Amino acid sequence: MTTKTAPKSGTTPKELKAKKDSKKKGNAPEPPKNGPPKTSPPNTIEKKGILRSLSFQFSNLTRKKCNDYDLTPEEDGVGYDEMGPVLGVQNYGILMKKYKRKNRTAKWAKRFFVLKECFLIYYATSYKKVFEKTRRIDLHPKGIIPLIGCSIVSGGDVDKKNCLLIAHPQLPTAIIVAAADHQMQEKWLKALRSATKISYKNTVVGETMIRELENRGVLLNEEKKSYEERLEAEAKARKQEHDRADELAKDKEELEVEREKLIRTTKKLKDDLQNVKNELKMTNEMKKTLEQEKMSLNSKTEHLQANMESLNIEKEKIHEQLQEIVREREKVLIDNQNLSTDKCQLNNRLMEIETSRNCIMTEKEKIETLLKMNEQKTQDLEKERQYYTMKTSELMDHLKEVSDQRDLTESELKEQMMARMGAEKQLQAAEKALEHLEMALKMTGAQMTELQEHIMPDVHKLREFFEQCAEESRFEANRTGIMRNAVYARKSIRRSKRGIRSSIRKKESAAPQIKEPLMQL
């Protein structure tokens, strides 16, 4: 008989109740309503479960003849009542268990052993704390060793000293466990040997316990299968629901992203539409204002073109007059240059006469020659006088023409002055009308604020236009002053010419007076 790891098989009624309570506390799924009924199956010859391998120890048919050294000596007077309560344990603690697999070296492992009546049950070492708290045996141990008919011998092994050997004829190999010290070894040896001394009552109790455990194990296995099937179905359903929830969450996130995109695009489109409407409204208003300005500018340009044409005509006339004045001035300058040269010559001659006068007594011959030269000069002067008389006649004719032109310019100036007076009167009337209009717009109050915003720019533009017209009229008035100055310049030139002629005449009249003393000399 070999030791095996026990599956989840049947248990005692109290342990089953405690297990159900622990399941309820752990929120485990309830058993299905249509599950198998909790009735004990009939006793069959075939035994299932982990405890099936233990049944041979309760039958005499399979018992072999055992040697004397394999049996533990029985002590008289030891009964079933001395072994402790059925639900209690005789001993528990941590021991080292030796195990060996096929084609592998033997190893030692720590296990938590519990001696329960005639069974040595072992668990993992972590179960020690749970057992010390609850004082209950778990129904799913690592393994169970039945001690009925087993011989317990103390000894030593290769690596361990305080070992216990559990042997049975039906076991292929002996089970070896090792205690931590000699005292622990003796304690376990005594407890294990007392557990092997089982009476008929214990065998009956063990047999019934095994059958009950097997029946309960079958029921629990069926319940476990139903639970597992139900858990698998629920797990699949939950997995499907989880997958669906994930898909729905992904779809929801995508829809949320698309909804946000649509909201942003709609908001952007609304803003763009509003901006386009505002721009269209502004463009329409600007178009209206531009059309009005265009009409006003067209009227202004037409008026300005008419003024420019009239001004160009006047400019051409003035330019022609200025050219004539420049020509006359050039002629006068030429005459002045000639007169200056003549004057210089006369001065030189006078100086020569004075020098000759000082030298008369010594140089008579020179005086005669000088007289001849003077006669020739007088002839030349006579010719020049005749020439100047001709020029004076021409200048007189020109003066008549200039006087006629002066009369014309004075008449034109009078007409321009009258036009200027009329324009100034019109400007004053327009300025008064603008002032009245501004006062009326200011006195209308808050109700006409919008009207003021539309009309005031036009009023300011009209005012600027009238101011420009006033400046142009002032410029024209100044231009008439320029023409008047030009006339005065002509008069001054004529006066200068007359002065020059009179000086020449005086010089000519003074020349014969100089000749007389010379002749006397």
Image: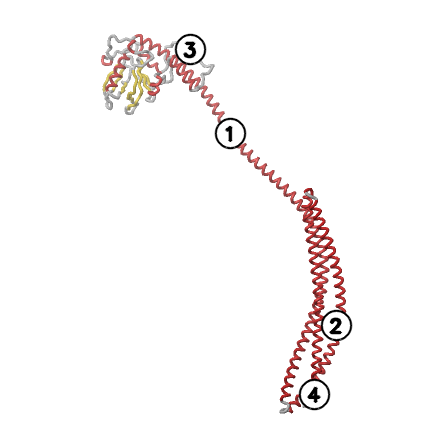
Between the residue at mark 1 and the residue at mark 2, the CA separation in whole angstroms equals: 115 Å
Label 2: which residue?
A: 399
Residue 191 is situated, as x and y percent measured from the top left of the image, at: 27, 14
Marks 3/4 in contact by CB < 8 Å: the verdict is no
Which residue is nearer to you in this view: 137 or 165? 137
Q: In the picture provided, is 30 more to the left or to the right than 330?
A: left
Q: Are marks 1 and 2 in contact (CB under 8 Å)?
A: no
> Badge 4 is on which residue?
516
Q: Are marks 4 and 2 in contact (CB under 8 Å)?
A: no
| Residue at the image point whose x is 47% and y is 21% from the top | 234
Q: Earlier in the sequence, mark 2 or mark 3?
A: 3
Q: Secondary structure at mark 1?
A: helix
**Which is in the foreground here, disc 1 or disc 3?**
1
Vertical arrangement, residue 310 with respect to residue 3, above or below? below
Q: Which residue is mark 1?
A: 249
Q: Amino acid at mark 4?
A: Glu
Q: Residue at x 64, y 88 (%)?
A: 357
The label number, if any, that marks residue 39 in the structure image:
3
Q: Nearer the viewer, mark 1 or mark 4?
A: 4
Are the residues tagged 2 and 3 within 8 Å (C-beta)?
A: no
Q: Quadrant of the N terminus?
A: top left
- Tell me the crowding category of disc 3: few under 14, some 14 to 19, or many 20 or more residues within 10 angstroms, Cα based: few
Is label 4 in a helix, a strand or a loop? Answer: helix
Quadrant placement of the C terminus = bottom right
In the structure shown, which secondary structural element does the residue marked by tag 3 occupy? loop
What amino acid is found at the position of numbered circle 1 in the picture? Ala
